[in-house]
Image (cartoon, coloured by chain):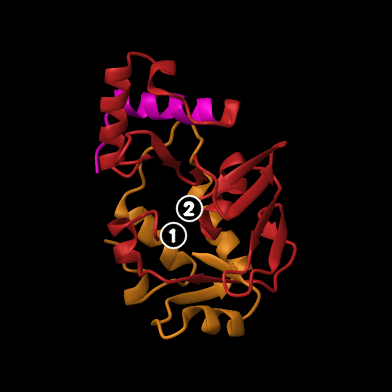
């Protein structure tokens, strides 16, 4: 899960590997906020799979690639 | 997934120690070492902390990395390490503060740095690539 300067850098880094998912760093930051912002809360409890899937879906991260185990 | 109240308390104390001291606690610093280690193992099984399987030492307190990584984050007056780009931004989110993420492009090695203000990156030109599908992240969370 890495940051890159451009699509060209991603393609070169992948070589022959199958690409995963690419998003803007702005979307990544939104995802990080939604996923991690409660992590130091005294009331934190493990997210359920449904909670995490809801975060992904809210951000438009859907499809087989984003299907959590 | 179920973590009981005692283990949630251990997790809270573990994270609080890490944020206060900037390093992971040893088991003995949180109580009876055997009990703490047993609790960490249960939390590891529930993906609430990540242990180094070879040493039983803490490896990740997601989004924080206990060990140095390619993702350095300046936030809250201290430098931290994220496990990946996602976690690096997650550190600012978890600390609920602005920050700065520094790394290098895995392709060319060029330094990359981005400030985070109010949850948004100031340089919006960078891209994030996630190689491993979500269903396989925990097959090898260190690689993911």
B14, above or below A12, in the image? above
Mark 1 residue crowding within 10 angstroms, few (<14) / some (14–19) / many (20+): some
Residue sitting at 30 percent across and 64 percent down? B136
Q: Percent from the top left, x then y, of residue B132?
A: 38, 69
Q: Which SS class for mark 1?
A: helix
Q: CA distance from mark 2 to mark 1?
A: 7 Å
Tell me whether marks 2 and 1 sit on the same chain. Answer: yes
Query: Per the image, is B11 magenta?
Result: yes
Task: Give the residues in magenta.
Answer: B1-18
- Looking at the image, do the residues carrying marks 2 and 1 touch, with CB atoms under 8 Å apart? yes
A56, above or below A48, in the image? below
Quadrant assignment for the C terminus of chain A: bottom left
Identify the mark at residue B142; answer none if there is no mark.
none
Say which colour chain B has. red
User: Viewed as shown, does residue B65 lie left or right of B9?
Assistant: right
The orange-coloured chain is labelled: A
In-front residue for pair B15/A5: A5
Q: How many marks?
A: 2
Identify the mark at residue A35; answer none if there is no mark.
2
Residue sitting at 36 percent across and 54 percent down? B141
- For disc 1, the marked residue is A55
Q: Which SS class for mark 2?
A: helix
Question: To which chain does the residue with label 1 belong?
Answer: A
Q: Percent from the top left, x then y, of residue B31?
A: 37, 14
């Amino acid at each position: 899960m890495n940051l890159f300067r451009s699509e060209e850098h991603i393609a070169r880094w992948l070589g022959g590997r199958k690409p995963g998912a690419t998003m803007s760093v702005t979307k990544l930051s939104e995802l990080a906020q939604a996923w991690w912002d409660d992590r130091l809360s005294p009331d934190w409890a493990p997210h359920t799979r449904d909670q995490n899937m809801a975060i992904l879906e809210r951000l438009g991260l859907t499809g087989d690639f984003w299907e959590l185990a | 997934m179920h973590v009981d109240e005692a283990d949630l308390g251990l997790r809270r104390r573990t994270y609080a120690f890490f944020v206060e001291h900037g390093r992971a606690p040893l088991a003995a610093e949180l109580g009876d070492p055997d009990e703490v280690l047993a609790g960490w193992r249960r939390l590891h099984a529930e993906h609430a902390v990540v242990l180094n399987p070879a040493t039983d030492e803490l490896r990740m307190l997601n989004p924080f990395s206990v060990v140095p990584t390619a993702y350095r984050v300046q936030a809250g007056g201290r430098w931290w390490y994220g496990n990946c780009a996602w976690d690096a931004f997650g550190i600012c989110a978890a600390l609920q503060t602005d920050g700065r993420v520094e790394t290098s492009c895995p392709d060319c090695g060029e330094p990359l740095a981005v400030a985070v203000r109010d949850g948004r990156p100031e340089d919006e030109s960078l891209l994030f690539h996630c190689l491993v599908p979500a269903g396989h992240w925990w097959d090898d969370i260190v690689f993911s």
